[in-house]
Amino acid sequence: MGLFFFAYRDFTGDADALLERQGFGRAHHRVLYFVNLRPGMPVADLLDILKITKQSLARVLRQLIDNGYVEQRTGHADRRQRLLYATDKGREFFAKLSETQASRIDASIDALPPEAANMVRRFLVGMVDPTDRAVLDRLNLTSKL
């Protein structure tokens, strides 16, 4: 568990500093991640993935929308549905946030023997609650397994 703590601390550290400069936190980063991963994601799906209250998400979303990082559109088939899209500013900021994290992951994976990369992916999937495995599949996060 100690290794996991240090890995997580260093994984999030650079992104946390960038987020703080914008007055944001990790919740903002999570929203930006999934909105960039799945443009047009309904708010309801985001609530299900993040497992946070509507009130918590509303506060974070309002800040991201007000600052021009995310836009909300009405659903085509269901006008009650709210769909989320990253703006150009949101995509650029997310790319900057992800750059150091992706390079840290890539360097760690590259240092392993080729067959170990899938073992790491399976380990991470194993850490996820089994009830969320279908969500991982829908988000194409298990496609390399």
Image (cartoon, helix red, strand yellow):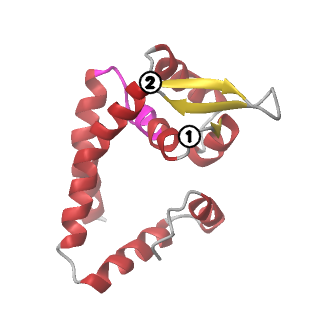
Q: Position of residue 84 (x, y in %)?
A: 59, 32
Is residue 82 visible in the rendered structure shown here?
A: yes
Which image quadrant: the N terminus?
Answer: bottom left
User: 36 above or below 128?
Assistant: above
User: 46 above or below 119?
Assistant: above
Q: Position of residue 144 (x, y in %)?
A: 45, 73
Q: Residue at left 54%, top 19%? A: 62
Assess whether residue 104 is covered by the magenta stretch. no
Residue 61 versus residue 75: which sits nearer the camera?
A: 75
Q: Residue at left 21%, top 50%? A: 10
Question: Dividing the picture into quarters, in which one does residue 118 lie?
Answer: bottom left
Element on which disc 2 rests: loop
Q: Position of residue 34 (x, y in %)?
A: 51, 43
| Pointer 1 residue | 39
Q: Is residue 98 left or right of residue 134?
A: left
Q: Which segment did they paint magenta?
A: 22-30
Q: Earlier in the sequence, mark 1 or mark 2?
A: 1
| Pointer 2 residue | 69
